[in-house]
Image (tube, helix red, strand yellow):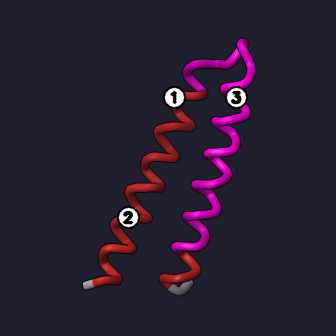
Amino acid sequence: MTLESHLAELQRKHGELERRIDEMALHPSVDDLELVELKRRKLKIKDEINKLASDTRH
């Protein structure tokens, strides 16, 4: 897998998690633990995207 395709896959996963989080936020009976876990995964992916992007600039 090339770096570009890996970044694209991470961005796709990040967007998918963002949509799921937004959708969950619309429902009053949201499982808070699941929501926190999704946000944690989204942040981890975002950090990885930023690290890979900064590595490619150097």
Mark 3 or mark 2: whose residue is earlier in sequence: 3
Residue 9 in picture, x, y percent from top left: 61, 69
Mark 1 or mark 3: whose residue is earlier in sequence: 3
Type of amino acid under label 2: Asn
Q: Nearer the viewer, mark 1 or mark 2?
A: 2
Is residue 28 shown above or below 45?
A: above
Q: Residue at x 56, y 83 (%)?
A: 1
Q: Would you name the residue on which mark 1 appears?
A: 36
Mark 1–mark 2 CB contact (< 8 Å): no
Left/right of residue 41 with respect to residue 53 in the rendered view = right
**Label 1 CA crowd tier, 10 Å (few <14, some 14–19, many 20+):** few
**Label 3 CA crowd tier, 10 Å (few <14, some 14–19, many 20+):** some
Residue 30 in picture, x, y percent from top left: 68, 18
Q: Which residues are magenta?
A: 7-34
Type of amino acid under label 3: Met
Left/right of residue 55 with respect to residue 42 in the rendered view = left
Q: Residue at x 70, y 28 (%)?
A: 24
Q: Main secondary structure of the magenta part?
A: helix
- Residue at the farthest top position: 29
Mark 1 or mark 2: whose residue is earlier in sequence: 1
Q: Would you name the residue on which mark 2 appears?
A: 50
Residue 45 in picture, x, y percent from top left: 47, 55
Q: Residue at x 53, y 82 (%)?
A: 4
Is residue 25 shown above or below 42?
A: above
The quarter of the rendered structure image containing the C terminus is bottom left
